[in-house]
Amino acid sequence: MLIVDDDPAMAAFMADVVEAFFQIKVLRAETAQAARDLFRRHAGEIRAMLCDFSIGDEAGTRLVKEFCATRADLNVIFVTGHGDVPMAVEAMRHGAFDFLQKPFRDQDLIDRVQQALERDRETREDLREHSRIRARIATLTPREKEVLDLLTVGKANKMMAQDLGLSQRTVEIHRAHVMEKMGAKSVAQLVRMVMDLERSEPAART
């Protein structure tokens, strides 16, 4: 986790709470440039981010926008003063995960971080599953990919045979190979796999 706050005492407090409760590594930055340097070196390791809405003379939203260009899945919790709440709400509309208003209790901090880490876990699992699906698709022959495309739009074997200029028996064989290679137990499961992949990565199969 990356904590960005230009108040050293606040940064240390948040780091102590997070490290003690979650037993995870915490990186601390007190300036925007220090945050950039840490993010550049550890972008792939950072599971979530606590960011003061204003870091010195720089708005936290601008800093976070830079980071999200590299890590679109980054879960950012803004730490705000009372006057910053409307801006923090607006930031959430543009992708921030949540905000935490000062002053806050230890449990408030723990709850927000726990939610962000859970979202990160779910995202990482989704990415692993999408990677597995892409790998399975890569094992299909060109003809099997054609059958997969027709299967996922609801074509029956007879219609696929007509579209591809094949016998229905040949289509049935290709279909069985597709189901086996994709690890799908039913056409419904196969369709869900492909649709989930296409929703998250529209260009993955082009």
Image (spheres, rainbow, N blue to C red):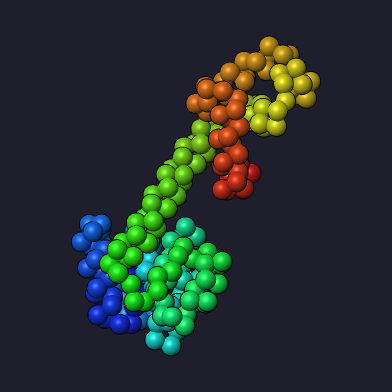
The answer to whether residue 113 is left or right of residue 91 is left
* Percent of width and height locating residue 87: 52, 77
Which residue is found at the position 62% from the left and 20% from the top? 175
Which residue is found at the position 42% from the left and 44% from the top? 125
Q: Is residue 73 visible?
A: yes
* Percent of width and height locating residue 194: 59, 36
Instruction: Please state, as top left, top right, bottom left or bottom right, where the C terminus lies in the image.
Output: top right
* Percent of width and height locating residue 116: 39, 58
Which residue is found at the position 41% from the left and 67% from the top? 77
Q: Quick check: 202 above or below 41?
A: above
Instruction: Judge by depth and name the residue closer to the eye, 75 or 46.
Output: 75
Instruction: Judge by depth and name the residue closer to the eye, 84 or 25.
Output: 84
Instruction: Judge by depth and name the residue closer to the eye, 191 or 44.
Output: 191
Residue at the bottom extreme of this rendering? 57
Q: Quick check: 8 above or below 138?
A: below
The answer to whether residue 131 is left or right of residue 52 is right
Residue at the top extreme of this rendering? 169
Which residue is found at the position 33% from the left and 82% from the top? 6
